[in-house]
Image (cartoon, grey):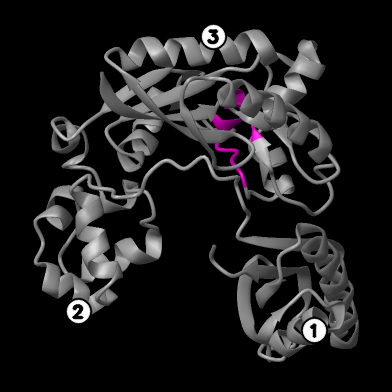
Amino acid sequence: MTAWVLHVDLDQFIAAVEVLRRPELRGLPVVVGGDGDPTKRGVVATASYEARAFGVHSGLPLRTAARRCPDAVFLPVDRAAYEAASERVMAVLRGLDAVTEVMGWDEAFLAVQTDDPEGYARQVQQKIKAATQLDCTVGIGENKLQAKLATGFGKPKIHPKPQLGEPGDSGSLGKPTGMFRLTHESWFEVLGNEPASVLWGVGAKTAAKLAELGIGTVSELATADVAAVAGRFGPTIGPWLVQTARGLDPSVVSAEPYLPRSRGREVTFQQDIEDWDRVRAEVAALARRVAEDVAAEGRPAVRVVVKVRYKPFFTSTHGVQLESPASDPAAIEAAALAALEWFTTGRPVRLLGVRAEFAPE
């Protein structure tokens, strides 16, 4: 028996839950976000594959989503429904003969011993489908990194639809494979010529810094001089980047309960706030709500971060380290207000957020 890691990722999870409740929406472009009113300010929580073909994606302003896909059905966020659906899925996974590491609402890693990982993956898909009517994609790898990246190759391929006034075909979804295997042997064949940004944990900013070193692809990063990369990113992150580009990942699948790294709240205002006394009052109120979440979590916070989004859509964050771990509302509110003092532009504000971060376990 061979050791494999499987990454189970629910397909268009939030949209799929909504379609199960409203079967008449199947096959239609569905967008979930805010209170479901695209004329108001808010962002997309998720979009069905049919909506994604129009360029609608998570984090996009609802008004922009409505312009890109005028015929979309917009629905409000229903957190309780998604949590309930997620728990049913995770209960199925925990009932398998595998070590299960839950990563959030819609994804988990499985550590399994099998000589037929594709067969095991099909069983996983069938059991989830039977219990919840939800579909999932399964990535197969020799470690978590490979399994996570493999999942993307098993997802439906979205062919963009033309925007209004643009020529082109009507757009479509490529046939999904539902699963994909990525191993040490196939790593460079599959990913070698891909941009380094495809790697798990490598964002746009990191990719830009790598480009300054003349590193653009996964293969170039994998063969880069470790000392040079460490000189740009530090003695920990630099070697980790090269190791990741080589398809190596020493982390193991753990059955320990999933613990969120932070708790946060945010609010989007339908009218920009120009009065910064009101901004401070709103931040204080958010901080008190976050303190309630921290207390319910039963773990003290070590850092508080404030997010401010200005008009039209520029976002900035500042954080403050707590003198000592705390769950006390007064301490979290004071830290949030201290972080707010780092924002000095006085520009009109369209969104505020407060996040309390926990110490690493």
Q: Name the residue under label 3.
A: 126
User: Tag 3's secondary structure?
Assistant: helix
Q: Mark 2 points at which residue?
A: 231
Disc 3 or disc 2, which is closer to the eye?
Answer: 3
| Vertical order, 302 against 24 (above or below) | below
In-front residue for pair 359/72: 359
Check residue 331 in the rendering and tell me which mark sits there, or answer none.
1
The boundaries of the magenta stretch are 47-58
User: How many numbered marks appear?
Assistant: 3
Where residue 48 sits, quadrant-wise, is: top right
Look at 71% across and 61% down and name the residue there: 263
Q: Which of marks 3 and 2 is nearer the N terminus?
A: 3
Q: Is residue 31 one of those drawn in magenta?
A: no
| Amino acid type assigned to the residue bearing label 3 in the image | Gln
Cβ atoms under marks 3 and 2 closer than 8 Å: no
Question: Badge 3: few (under 14), some or many (20 or more) residues near its Cα, within 10 Å?
Answer: some
